[in-house]
Image (tube, rainbow, N blue to C red):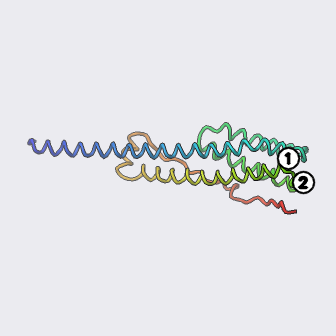
Amino acid sequence: MSRRAWIVVAVLAALLAFKGVGAYNGIVRSDVAVNEKWGQVQNVLQRRADLIPNLVQTVKGYAAHEKEIFENVAAARAKLAGARTPEDAMKANAEVTSALSRLLVVVENYPQLKADQTFIRLMDELAGAENRIAVERMRYNEAVSAYNTSIRVFPNSLVAGLTGYGGKPFFEAETKAKEVPKVDFGK
């Protein structure tokens, strides 16, 4: 091979190497963004979990005989606290949401509880936490979408495959969580 051919091959190899490094760096940035957004989701899930014991104690003062509901809420909260992966946290979050829905249905039977200032304040805080969860879940899913797209397009797909980067799960609501519980505080 002539000297000129070697130079062309060397230039092409350098261009491919730079493109590969750029693709790798882009994938790493996307991966970090997903992890950062997941951290925010965990932060707001923890905020909601921190509200639950106070809410349960307030309801217990009026409905002490609803022991099974309180145990379900506590067990769901413990699963969320023990979740180690996004998938586990998503599943545990669905259980917390379901348990809280059942707790709020119990509240309907206690009009004096609905007028309790501590309960009202806790419900406002819980509503705020739920809104923050929705926002952070959306931001996480946007980051996952960008990341999953980046590792599927060429040449990033080659780099992702060689470096072990795989797809990330979206934070989707469980089928049960999509059903709106019927709660009426207006009685």
**Residue sitting at x 55%, y 52%:** 139
**Which quadrant holds residue 10?**
top left
x, y percentage for residue 88? 63, 42
Circle 1: element type: helix
| Left-right relation of 57 to 90 | right
Residue 110: mark in rendering: 2
Which residue type does callout 2 highlight? Tyr
| Residue at image point 32% right, 44% down | 20
* Residue contact at pointers 2 and 1, CB within 8 angstroms: yes
Say the numbered circle drawn on residue 76.
none
**x, y (%) of residue 85?**
59, 40
Residue 131, image x, y percentages: 67, 54
Q: Residue at x 83, y 46 (%)?
A: 69
Amino acid type assigned to the residue bearing label 1 in the image = Val
Residue drawn at point x = 77 percent, y = 44 percent: 73
Q: Is 28 in front, or is 83? A: 28
Residue 59, label in figure = 1
User: What separation in Å lies between label 2 and label 1 (alpha carbons)?
Assistant: 9 Å
Instruction: Left or right? Give the position of 94 relative to 155.
Output: right
Crowd around label 2: few <14 · some 14–19 · many ≥20 (10 Å): some
